[in-house]
Image (cartoon, rainbow, N blue to C red):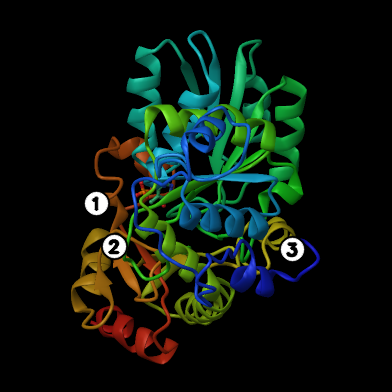
Amino acid sequence: MPEHKPDTLGVRAGALRSDFQEHSEALALTTSFVFRNAAEAARRFANEEPGNIYSRFTNPTVTMFQKRLAALEGAEACVATATGMAAVATMALGLLKTGDHLIAARGVFGTVVPLFDQILARLGIATTWVDLSDLDAWKRAVRRETRLLFLETPSNPVCEVADIAALAAIAKGAGAVLAIDNCMCSPALQRPIEFGADLVIHSATKYLDGQGRVLAGAIAGRADLVSGPLYQFVRTAGPAISPFNAWICLKGMETLRLRMQAQSQSALALARWLESHPGVERVLYPGLDSHPQHALAMRQQSAGGAVLSFVARGGREAAWRVIDAVKMISITANFGDVKSTVCHPATTTHGRIPAAEREASGIVEGLVRLAVGLEHPDDIRADLERGLKA
Ligand SMILES: *Cc1c(COP(=O)(O)O)cnc(C)c1O
């Protein structure tokens, strides 16, 4: 239903009904599907007629999830995976072969680094790491063998923003695919395909579920890639999503726009308050006028998003004091939940990166990452104030 507005797509797109005419989307928790006769089974397996066969590669609940996400991203097609990392691995292994080269932004989700530097490297696929917003570095890194450009925008936890249209032009010139991890914004705030991205990667574990219940992932984008090699990879290698997890995310997407708008609004209010707080050195949030890429961010995103970081005055000691003083906000490395979470990236998610490299990428000892949930912003502020005042 491309003629509908995004709010409508989130609630309605992709919905299918069984013969029961159920109103709420059904959970088809079944491994396989029954054929009326041998000839029907043969036609399904020969791809001569559409229909469900086996839930590793055809399941109606998974299909609904894929169609709804494709509609929200403005994508031609979508394939779901078991986790966000399974989506990244499917993208790489489904598209690349020995001898190929890819370029990735430093500061992508941490687990991507060993996937590229160890597993892909072992297969003879080389990665060049570049700074997210340094367009000349992306251009210089292009080789004849370059097949893929991969990044996240805004980045986590320092909220750096990439110019998607400029990177799409570089990818096009190189004959490579541009893939954007859209976890931080979700399609409610940013649709990378509109700016020229070929693929959008999701950890649906984050805002698509939105309530921290299940792991899930997806790749949306060009049909020649998604319905071709990427779907074939999921079907044959098997990193498929559970129908239950797809159902959770399908229902989560019904409130995605409302959640993202409300959580972004609270994040902006908190970012402004933190920026004026004497205990805070600096706030990193694309929605703030003071963000060095604010104008670019607001061209690509309809709001700043729900994740912000700030540098507490006084280094690690000050950062830990803020975290240890919270009574309501959860101390956890996850984000994307309706419950606010806080963490200290330098000693958790980014603790294994050598200190000099970590500091150079902006993940300093005083940095605190806050993922803003749906609690009242006054309560979140009061919870943070306690440690900042101390
Ligand atoms: C969490 C996350 C992933 C990995 O997703 P899983 O579902 O945990 O496998 C990938 N990219 C980003 C940006 C993430 O935040």
Q: Which mark is residue 41?
A: none
Q: Position of residue 185 (x, y in %)?
A: 56, 60
Residue, disc 3: 1
| Nearest-to-viewer mark from 3 and 2 | 3
Residue, disc 1: 348
Marked residue nearer the N-terminal end (3 or 1): 3
Q: Quick one: quadrant of the C terminus?
A: bottom left
The reply to whether callout 2 and callout 1 are in contact (CB within 8 Å) is yes
| Residue 184 visible in rendering | yes
Q: Quick one: quadrant of the N terminus?
A: bottom right
* Mark 3, secondary structure of its residue: loop
- Vertical position of residue 302 compared to residue 158: above or below: below
| Residue 205 visible in rendering | no
Q: Is residue 236 left or right of residue 288?
A: left
Task: Give me the residue at 52% from left, 57% from top.
Answer: 65
For the view shown, which residue lies furthest in the left direction?
A: 324
Marked residue nearer the N-terminal end (2 or 1): 2
Residue, disc 2: 343
Marked residue nearer the N-terminal end (3 or 2): 3
Task: Give me the residue at 70% from left, 28% from top.
Answer: 171
Tell me which amino acid carries mark 3: Met
